[in-house]
Image (tube, rainbow, N blue to C red):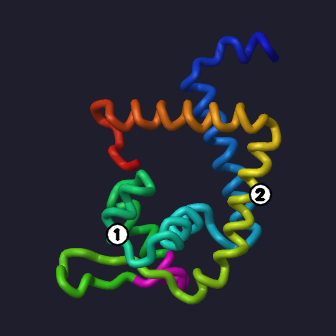
Amino acid sequence: MKHIQQKLTLGHLLARVSRLVGSRMRVNLEEIGLPHSHGMVLFHLWHQDGIAQNILARALHITPPTATSTLQRMERDGWIQRRRDGSDQRIVRVYLTQKARVVRDRARNVFEELDRELASVMTQKERQTLIDSLLKVQSQLSSAPGGDQTP
């Protein structure tokens, strides 16, 4: 196993870990009745209800058409409402419904449990070093040509 790990590049390892975390999150959210894509949208809305749809798409690192189709499904299923901005009709704002508000605590528990699981294999110092390192990588990739400028 060590021999294989030594051949992995940093990019491959980050991609592998990202897929594993995403897969775990997907399974855990689906257990409480939330498709993964809905959970990520709701997570943002729980922090900023009424956000503009285009800003939400950037925050989720998805294209505007992908955001539109995801939000259409969520609206159809009763998770969100979309309304034109009162002062600028070009802007579509996304709002939580009561259904989304009710599941917030359960979803937060899913996010926190995964965070505890990830942190359990590291010391506090290792965890902080990993966070600092990943923030540096994110900053570098975001500022490179073609990078996503979303913080």
Disc ID at residue 113: 2
Q: Residues within 10 Å of mark 1 (few under 14, many from 20)?
A: many
Instruction: Identify residue type, mark 2.
Output: Glu
Instruction: Identify residue type, mark 1.
Output: Gln
Q: Which residues are magenta?
A: 74-81
- Where does residue 77 sit, x and y in percent of width and height? 54, 82
- Of the residues tagged 1 and 2, which is closer to the observer? 2
- Horizontal side of 39 relative to 64 (left or right) equals right
Q: Is residue 36 above or below residue 20?
A: below
Specify the quadrant that holds the N terminus. top right
Image quarter of residue 65: bottom left
- Where does residue 31 sit, x and y in percent of width and height? 76, 68
- Where does residue 111 sit, x and y in percent of width and height? 68, 59
In the image, what residue occupies the spot 72% across and 59% down?
Answer: 112
Which secondary structure lies at badge 2? helix
Query: Magenta segment: does it hold 75?
Result: yes
Query: Magenta segment: does it hold 101?
Result: no
Q: Is residue 112 above or below residue 34?
A: above
In the image, what residue occupies the spot 35% across and 43% down?
Answer: 148
Q: CA distance from mark 1 to mark 2?
A: 29 Å
- Where does residue 20 sit, x and y in percent of width and height? 69, 42
* Residue at which label 1 appears: 53
